[in-house]
Image (cartoon, rainbow, N blue to C red):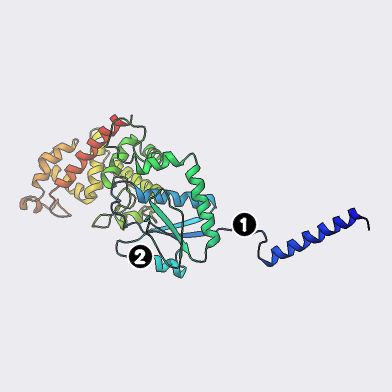
Amino acid sequence: MTRKESIALAVTVLLIACTGIAALLGKSPEAPYERPAHIRCVLELAPLADTSKALVTGYQYELLQRYAAGGGQTLDIRLTGRNRSYLDSLRAGAVDIVVVPFEDSLAVDSVLVSTPVDSLCLWMMRHDEHAGMRDLNDWIDAWHRSEDYAPVRAAYLKDYNPMRGGRRTQLSPYDSLIRAHADTLGWDWHLLAAVIWQESRFHIEARSPRGAAGLMQMMPGTAERYGVSDPLDPEMNIAAGAELLGNLIRRYYKVGDNMTERYKYALAAYNAGVGRIDDCLRVAQLLGTDTGYWQNVVNQVLPRMQDETTLATGAVKVGPFRGEETVFYVDNVIAIYERFCRICP
């Protein structure tokens, strides 16, 4: 064997030996991480000092949607209550990701914690999901470097209040959804945006003491009737609220003298319920009031909606109705609409 052949053989043996050692040490290339088909997530953001200003919940919901879409996954997102923790559910495998407020001193046993998401929140996984956490951290890093990062973050966390400042090109992170569903109504999109601002201030997590939820603050029974299975879902909530408003417009189309008056009746019914407004219209008929203009009902009918003589006529089916809240609601939505038209033409 020549010297050259001896060297080649030695190199080959060395390469084989190194490959074997690497295999014994577990250094073989890792298989690509396969995400689960479905992710169960919980937003545990109640401990934040103040979520009423920036749209923190909406932002985290948006990020989770983007993360799942990137892996072709379906997603279930829930919101925890103020005095409830889902960390035990995470450890037990009943939940896949828990989103919590970022804290420098955060120390949680038996879970994996992601890199910070904009110094606002952290995403947690089970202690054995190392590959999943690497994938998640890679996605967070890519998100921070993406073109969408700055404008999306600003829409939720910086420019979230359309009432602050002057002219702007965007009212909310949900403008595209609002425009699309306003078109189905035949409404100026600013008016639908005004309803949402009045109802929830663009907070997807908004919930009233009576149980109304979501951007358009729909009651559970109404939401179910209009196909809302996830009250947090912005598109689902806006679509259902727009459909309800469209039905109300049609219901009172022949009542109002023009579209502005029809809008007012629809808004009044959205706030007080169809039964209350129909009661007002029956009383108006008894009084001979011109119902073509909502203000006539406000001035002439509402003051009579608690009188015993009015109730005795049988025209009032639901019961006495003060109406101040509804009058304020209609006036305020119209005022917000006019302001939105000025600041975001």
Q: Whole-percent x and y of residue 73?
A: 52, 55
Q: In this view, does 35 lie to the left or right of 313?
A: right
Whether 318 is drawn above or below 248: the answer is below
Question: Where is 49 relative to 298, above or below?
Answer: below
Residue 13, horizontal then vertical, whole percent: 81, 61
Hey, what amino acid is under mark 2? Ser
Could you tell me residue 341's position as x and y percent?
A: 29, 31
What amino acid does circle 1 point to? Pro
Residue most toward the front? 3
Please report the residue visible at 42 percent of the width from the left and 55 percent of the height from the top.
122
Q: Mark 1 points at which residue?
A: 32
> How many marks are shown on the rendered structure?
2
Q: In this view, does 312 lie to the left or right of 338?
A: left
Q: Which quadrant holds the C terminus?
A: top left
Numbered badge on residue 85: 2
Residue name at image x 43 percent, y 50 percent = 117
Label 2 – label 1 distance at C-alpha? 32 Å
Residue extending farthest to the right is 1
Q: Where is residue 162 in the image (x, y as percent from the top left)?
A: 30, 37
